[in-house]
Image (cartoon, helix red, strand yellow):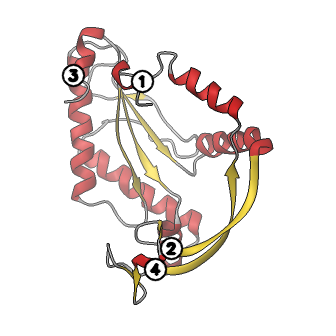
Amino acid sequence: IPLLPLLPMRIPPIITTPLFYVNAPPHIGHAFSTVLADILTRFYCVKDFGCTKMLTGTDEHGSKVAGAARNAGVPLASFVQLQRGAFVRQAQSLGVGVDTVWSHTAGHSCASSGPLPTDQHLLDTGTSCGPHASTVASLVDRLSPHLRTSRHAGYYCPGEEAFVPDEQVVDGLDSQSGKPVEWLEEEVRVLVPTDGHREQVRAWLHSDVVLPSRYATAA
């Protein structure tokens, strides 16, 4: 277990699942990773790590999500809310974070779980919820002086959510994944860093924010 090295350091960790895509209902793979995260969270509670938290939630952005809502004939916001609810019910049915209050409008919740020590908490977030959306908007606003607008065009694979090199496209398919591609032209905002930014980032990365510290050089 990667977090076991934290034991001698007594650092209360935050255990996370992936943020699950809401383009389709939850399946056994989602359940598996959620249960693993719950087990690890309980382990750290037993080891008396203080306020150990478990984070789970849903990724509600991307062309796959928009496409799934369009195919279902449901407005995007309603589709996301319905799908997010399915993930919440799956976690609850598995006994993960029992009695936890899931807050969608607030973007997250932190409530104690019944059978677990009171310092074990479950955090739930959705990427279209208030705190996440406002944080992203604030960040973009702060970066706006350093952003420039450009246009990008190329073959895009919705299934992989990635652009594909021209030479990798054969008969309208991505030759590596076998999934269909489409020609996409879009306006993008690109961050233009300066030498001053690079030095700031380099100094920050070497200010003991990277753990374990042996990865600081790679960062």
Q: Residues within 10 Å of mark 2 (few under 14, many from 20)?
A: many
Q: Is residue 18 above or below residue 29?
A: above
Are discs 3 and 2 less than 8 Å apart at CB? no
Instruction: Indicate the amino acid at tag 2.
Output: Tyr
Quadrant location, the N terminus: top left
Instruction: Indicate the amino acid at tag 3.
Output: Leu
The image's mark for residue 89 is: none
Instruction: Indicate the amino acid at tag 4.
Output: Val
Pointer 3 residue:
4
Residue 73 picture location, percent across and down: 53, 80
Q: Residues within 10 Å of mark 1 (few under 14, many from 20)?
A: some
Q: Nearer the viewer, mark 3 or mark 2?
A: 2
| Nearer-N-terminus badge (2/4) | 2
**SS label for mark 4:** loop
Q: Residues within 10 Å of mark 3 (few under 14, many from 20)?
A: few
Pointer 2 residue:
156
Residue 130 picture location, percent across and down: 62, 44
**Residue at x-position 32% and y-position 29%:** 113
- The Cα atoms of the two marked residues, 1 and 4, are separated by 38 Å
Residue 162 picture location, percent across and down: 47, 65
The image's mark for residue 216 is: 1
Residue 43 seen in this snapshot: yes
Are discs 2 and 4 less than 8 Å apart at CB? yes
Q: Is residue 88 above or below residue 98?
A: below
Q: Nearer the viewer, mark 1 or mark 3?
A: 1
- The Cα atoms of the two marked residues, 3 and 2, are separated by 40 Å
Pointer 4 residue:
181
| Nearer-N-terminus badge (3/2) | 3
User: Quarter of the image holding residue 99?
Assistant: top left
Residue 215 picture location, percent across and down: 37, 26
